[in-house]
Amino acid sequence: GENVEQHPSTLSVQEGDSAVIKCTYSDSASNYFPWYKQELGKGPQLIIDIRSNVGEKKDQRIAVTLNKTAKHFSLHITETQPEDSAVYFCAASASGNTPLVFGKGTRLSVIA
Amino acid sequence: EAQVTQNPRYLITVTGKKLTVTCSQNMNHEYMSWYRQDPGLGLRQIYYSMNVEATDKGDVPEGYKVSRKEKRNFPLILESPSPNQTSLYFCASIPSGTGGEAFFGQGTRLTVV
């Protein structure tokens, strides 16, 4: 089955700097790669996703890149703000009713 | 408002006392899933359901049961809870199994003493 590795497990950045979180996956059939943000006391919420027919997707200060050959994808947050502090999860799944598999999460702290 | 509702939010119980955590979604989603979240281990899938009367084991199904008699409800049952099931539990629903936004409930923090 699919295995998703996520790094780093913790990340501290100064406000205004960029943050990058990386994930690798094992199943070449995976074609859907979402990122979730979990704030304290809440369930994870989708912030951006990418499908395998696209190499990069941007939404304001966040972007996701995908390298299908190397089986890795990354989350980029620019101009970080204190409200970006949260736990971020990457995930992967293949079409055809296969489960969504999550990475172990990255705790991002943005220091003002 | 589109949402996934879990109950209860917090529960302290004793070893061996059967309990059920309810999950309900109002989005007519086909796919529902239960995860447990433990420090350093991320979100691990317990069980999932592709549709009514279709359930399957995830990565950590031992000690849990589920049922999917109606599309909107997906309860998690612990027949004989043990302390190693102390965890934060999340229910999620997705429009279908072919990839799409997963909507999560607010979580249930379970403590088994």
Image: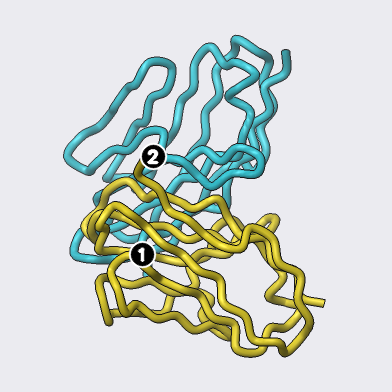
Chain colours: A cyan, B yellow
Q: Chain of mark 1?
A: B
Residue drawn at x 28%, y 28% is A56
What is the three-letter code of the residue carrying label 2?
Answer: Phe
Left or right: B47 with respect to B17? left
Left or right: A20 with respect to A15? left
Residue drawn at x 72%, y 18% is A111
Looking at the picture, how far across and down is residue B11, in whole percent? 71, 67
Looking at the picture, how far across and down is residue A103, in whole percent? 50, 52
Residue drawn at x 59%, y 13% is A17
Is the N terminus of chain A in the top left, top right, bottom left or bottom right quadrant? Answer: bottom left
Is the C terminus of chain A in the top left, top right, bottom left or bottom right quadrant? Answer: top right
Quick check: can you spot residue A29?
Answer: no
Q: Nearer the viewer, residue B72 or A10?
A: B72
Q: Which residue is mark 2?
A: A73
Q: Chain of mark 2?
A: A
- Dot 1 falls on a residue whose secondary structure is strand
Q: Which residue is mark 1?
A: B32
Instruction: Report how far apart the C-alphas of labels 2 and 1 lie in the structure.
Output: 25 Å
Of badges 2 and 1, nearer the viewer stands 1
**Is there one chain holding both mark 2 and mark 1?**
no
Looking at the picture, how far across and down is residue B113, in whole percent? 82, 77
Looking at the picture, how far across and down is residue B107, in whole percent? 58, 55
How many other residues sit within 10 Å of disc 1, few (<14), some (14-19) or many (≥20)?
Answer: many
